[in-house]
Image: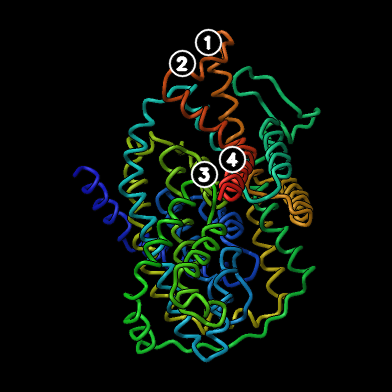
Amino acid sequence: MEDFGALMHGFSVVLSWHNMGLMFVGILLGIVVGVLPGLGGPNGVAILLPLTFGMSPTSAIILLSCIYWGALFGGAITSVLFNIPGEAWSVATTFDGYPMAQQGQAGEALTLAFTGSFLGAISGVLLITFLAPLVASFALEFGPPEFFAVFFLTFCSFIGMGKEAKAKIVAAMGVGLLLAAVGMDTISGELRMTFGSGELLRGFDFLVVVIGLFGISEILMTIEEGLAFKGKKARIDLKVVLKTWAGLPRYWMTMLRSSAIGCWMGVTPGGAVAASFMGYGLAKKFSRRGDHFGKGEAEGVLAPETAAHAAGTSALLPMLALGIPGSATAAVLLGGLMIWGLQPGPLLFTEQKDFVWGLIASMYMGNLAGLIIVLSTVPLFAAILRIPFSIVAPMILMVCAIGAFTVNGSSSDIWMMLIFGVVGYVFKKLDYPLAPMVLALVLGDRMEDAFRQSMLGSNGNIAVFWHNGLSGTIVTLALVLLFWPVIGAVLGKLRGQKDKLVADAA
């Protein structure tokens, strides 16, 4: 009941004219970010993060989270009309969305995509509303060993459950840990890996790094690919929307299943991309019209969008409750919280109630506002794709440079941003994931501090991580996830041998 009252107070915070204005601005900016192929939610949030300097933390997080919701919605527009996924998690939407557009059903396809996105996001917000306070309350009992165990679990789950090559995930994570270690040691006060440079005394600024890694590298990638857009036109009116909504109840199981998949993949580091493909695959498997998937099937649009948005939203749960990001975007938002002087984690729910519940309330309002805006402005945002990239790219580059400069007022940060832009470009060309690197950059210091404090408290006894059932269970689970690819392969081999023996016996 206390949480319900806090949520209502959060709505009163969000519904001020100032915050409502920021919400609409964030949604519009986010849709632009989502429409521009390759730019994406994490890139857009990282590039536009400096806009929040000078704002209160609540207003700032409302603006940034609405940019994220807008990017989630915007990705579907290019997928359906141009067969170009605006976001990686919109790839599965093209399978049936573009065929529907070719058949003159672009309005129906976009309505399905936006509605699925809205329902998926709301399922994620409900999960956060009811589960995050419980997780945070539980986490208040944590000491250094428990915090290290949770950080260790996060890193291990990224390695064990990540879809990319394990060696590349470990390498990217190692680079992030090295970058996080540069500067002053927070426990001993000694300088590390500064090589006599005054610029490195404060370490690598998180914001400068992510603007380069995400923003600049995407510009380089897009220039290289030389995108050209030729798409279908869409006309959405109230009649199309209502007719499409009238047919939604028959897909209730698909929406429920995709929401559950998305929430699970969001809380774990599976992510929105894996959730969208899993949602699409299971919808095709269980649908009575599975043979029609890929030819313009409505369920094929609804399932991936619902799963992707549920994952994108629920990824914020571990960030809020434990201070651990569940996605690249959550990692960028986590960095933003630190810049605004907030310490992500369980204490947020007791020390910054207005902020937390204002954010959760903005998730409801932001997604509702996003649904209304995208349904009414599709032709406008589709027209953005007809602006030559030679005009759009310099504008994005200028925003990135201004953002990097405003962090410390230093021109060297612009050069640092460009260097990390090249690093991000090389990582993408070599198919190295950026999310583990960002995760390590954000959490590396905190994990190291928790580990060293645990060692100091136990006189160097590693068994401190099994000194109680909680930390012992988390560390053991982390090790299981770390070696899950090996364990899964062994179990699969044993299962194959058993099936063979049964077949021989028959």
Q: Which residue is mark 3?
A: 325
What numbered label is drawn on residue 491?
A: 4
Classify mark 3: helix, strand or loop: loop
The answer to the question of whether label 2 and label 1 lie on touching residues, with beta carbons closer than 8 A, is yes
Which amino acid lies under the numbered mark 2 shown in the image of this protein?
A: His
Residue that label 2 marks: 467
Residue at the image position 47 percent from the left and 89 percent from the top: 235
The quadrant in which residue 489 appears is top right
Q: Earlier in the sequence, mark 2 or mark 1?
A: 1
Residue occupying the far bottom of the picture: 104
Is 324 situated left or right of 183 in this image? left
Q: Quarter of the image for the N terminus: give it.
A: top left
Residue hosting label 1: 458
Question: What amino acid type should be assigned to the residue bearing mark 1?
Answer: Ser
Name the mark nearer the viewer: 4 or 2: 4
Vertical order, 251 against 479 (above or below): below
- What distance separates the C-alpha of mark 3 from that of mark 1? 28 Å
Which mark is nearer the camera, 1 or 4?
4
Q: Residues within 10 Å of mark 2 (few under 14, many from 20)?
A: few
Q: Is residue 474 visible?
A: yes
Q: Secondary structure at mark 4?
A: helix
Q: CA distance from mark 2 to mark 1?
A: 10 Å
Residue 13 placement (x, y as % from top left): 30, 54
Dot placed on the residue nearer the N-terminal end, 1 or 4: 1
Sooner in the amino-acid sequence: mark 2 or mark 3? 3
Q: Position of residue 201 (x, y in %)?
A: 70, 30
